[in-house]
């Protein structure tokens, strides 16, 4: 039986790269607009989405818009690095593990499972 979806990985990476290429300029423009707005808005509540939306509509600066803009640019950079990392490691196989799995039940100790009987009384 042949694998009919063997080329799905490269196609998904190409799609992700295409989306990033189109989305990145828009996010950067929005981040620059948030940073270079006319001035602080009437409300400077840091986590108020209503005030942030009102400031966005009126072209004013708002702390929440600034945070979103900074994190959006950083998030796109992380996603772009992940896509390029997947492309660079696509041909490599993970190294084999040297330690075989334990045959018996785990011994008690730090980080190990230990059964604790629990009784519930009414």
Image (spheres, helix red, strand yellow):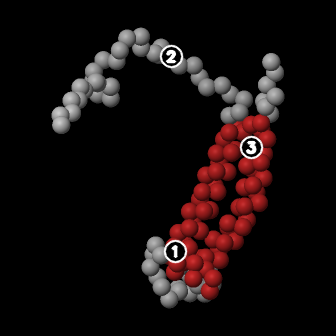
Q: Nearer the viewer, mark 2 or mark 3?
A: 3
Which element is circle 1 on? helix
Query: Are the residues flagged by discs 2 and 3 in contact, CB closer than 8 Å?
Result: no
Q: Is residue 91 left or right of residue 41?
A: right
Residue appearing at x 65%, y 77% in the figure: 33
Considering every residue shown, the one lying at the far front of the view is 122
Q: CA distance from mark 1 to mark 2?
A: 52 Å
Q: Quick check: 119 above or below 1?
A: below
**Closer to the camera in the image, 93 or 107:** 107
Considering every residue shown, the one lying at the far top of the view is 103
Residue 64, image x and y in percent? 51, 73
Q: Quadrant of residue 56?
A: bottom right
Q: Quick check: 82 above or below 100?
A: below
Q: Quick check: 21 above or below 54?
A: above
Please name the residue that numbered disc 3 is placed on: 13
Of pointers 3 and 1, the one earlier in the residue sequence:
3
Q: Residues within 10 Å of mark 2 (few under 14, many from 20)?
A: few
Which element is circle 2 on? loop
Q: Quadrant of the N terminus?
A: top right
What number is the disc on residue 5?
A: none
Please name the residue that numbered disc 2 is placed on: 98
Q: Nearer the viewer, mark 1 or mark 2?
A: 1
Residue 22, image x and y in percent? 77, 60
Whether residue 107 is visible: yes
Considering every residue shown, the one lying at the far left of the view is 121
Q: CA distance from mark 2 to mark 3?
A: 31 Å
Residue appearing at x 68%, y 67% in the figure: 28
Of pointers 1 and 2, the one earlier in the residue sequence:
1
Please name the residue that numbered disc 1 is placed on: 49
Q: CA distance from mark 3 to mark 1?
A: 34 Å
Q: Residues within 10 Å of mark 1 (few under 14, many from 20)?
A: few
Q: Quick check: 19 above or below 59?
A: above
């Amino acid at each position: 039986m042949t694998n009919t979806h063997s080329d799905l990985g490269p196609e998904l990476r190409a799609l992700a790269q295409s989306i990033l290429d189109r989305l990145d300029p828009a996010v950067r423009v929005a981040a620059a607009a948030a940073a270079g707005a006319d001035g602080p808005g009437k409300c400077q509540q840091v986590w108020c989405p209503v005030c942030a939306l009102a400031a966005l509509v009126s072209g004013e600066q708002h702390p929440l818009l600034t945070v979103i803009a900074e994190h959006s640019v950083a998030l796109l950079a992380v996603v772009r690095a992940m896509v390029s990392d997947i492309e660079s490691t696509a041909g490599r196989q993970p190294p084999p593990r040297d330690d075989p799995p334990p045959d018996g039940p785990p011994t008690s100790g730090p980080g190990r499972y230990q059964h604790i009987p629990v009784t519930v009384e009414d």
